[in-house]
Each structure stands twice: as structure tokens, then as C-alpha cells.
Image (cartoon, rainbow, N blue to C red):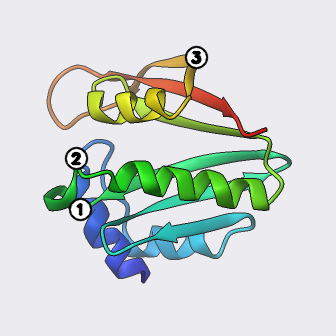
Amino acid sequence: MTPDALAALHARCFTMPRPWSAAEFAALLASKGVFLQSTAAGFALGREIAGESELLTLAVDPALQRQGHGRRLLASFETESRKRGATEALLEVAATNTNARVLYKTAGYSESGRRPRYYSPPQGEKIDAILMRKSLI
């Protein structure tokens, strides 16, 4: 997927935190340790550094959600993370993103911390970020 396609899909999936631009995706893709796992349904963008792999974002076309694509992209992220030498995966998710939290918990991630009032939605109160981790060994 091109940075433009990544940004377009990200914009269809997220309003908070704000969608990332094509320029931001291009810069990330050019960064050390960053990798992309993608299908026609969506993508997972990760970064492996010193044995840890961070899921930067995961997006599935809204018309194709709830069909297992997110689970498969997450598994692909984990497989690539292991290939790159990661022994642990981490991510953050908005406390209000129930579907994503269920996906991650079902995949074996557990809450490891919180960032209170981390996300600033366009309207309403700030939302906590939940930090999650999973051993990849």
C-alpha cells in the first residue's frame, strides 16, 4: 500500500486520535525498524527495536470489519515481529475502543499500564490510553 492509500484508509477508520497523513506514513515507512503488513482489507504498521515490537496502528476497512481481518493482520504483525527478533509486542489503545480491546485481549495481550487523559477527542472529555503487552516467545 502506498502512503496515500494508507492515509485514506486510516481516515476512514479513525477520528480520534486524528488520522495520519500520507506524509506521516511516508516518514514512518522510511524509519528504522518500521514494517508494514497489509492485505486488501487493511494494514498493520509496526516497529521493532531492541527486541520489542510496537504496533503503531492497525486499520481495517470499515465495510470489512468483524470478519477476522484484524485478527489476521495482528497475527501477521506478530509473525514479522518474531522474524525481526522481537520477544515482546506492545501497543496502546483508547479506553473507549472496545472492539480493539477485545481483539487484543483475545490475542493474548494484557494491560500493562495507562496514560490518563491521553487522547483529546474533537468533542468531550479526554480519554485514557491503555498500554498492552504480549510475550512473543
Horizontal relation, residue 81 to residue 125: left or right: right
Q: Is residue 74 above or below residue 8?
A: above
Quarter of image, res 126: top left
Which-is-in-front pick, marks 1 and 3?
Answer: 1
**Which residue position holds label 1?**
61
**Which residue position holds label 2?**
66
Q: CA distance from mark 1 to mark 3?
A: 29 Å
Q: Secondary structure at mark 1?
A: loop
Lower position in the chain sequence, tag 1 or tag 3:
1
Residue visible at 24% across and 61% down?
11
Residue visible at 67% across and 61% down?
80
Q: Amino acid at mark 2?
A: Arg
Residue visible at 32% across and 51% down?
68
Q: Residues within 10 Å of mark 2 (few under 14, many from 20)?
A: few
Q: Considering depth in this image, is 128 or 83 the residue closer to the camera?
A: 83
Q: Is residue 74 above or below residue 107?
A: below
Image location of residue 106, percent across then percent down = 45, 29
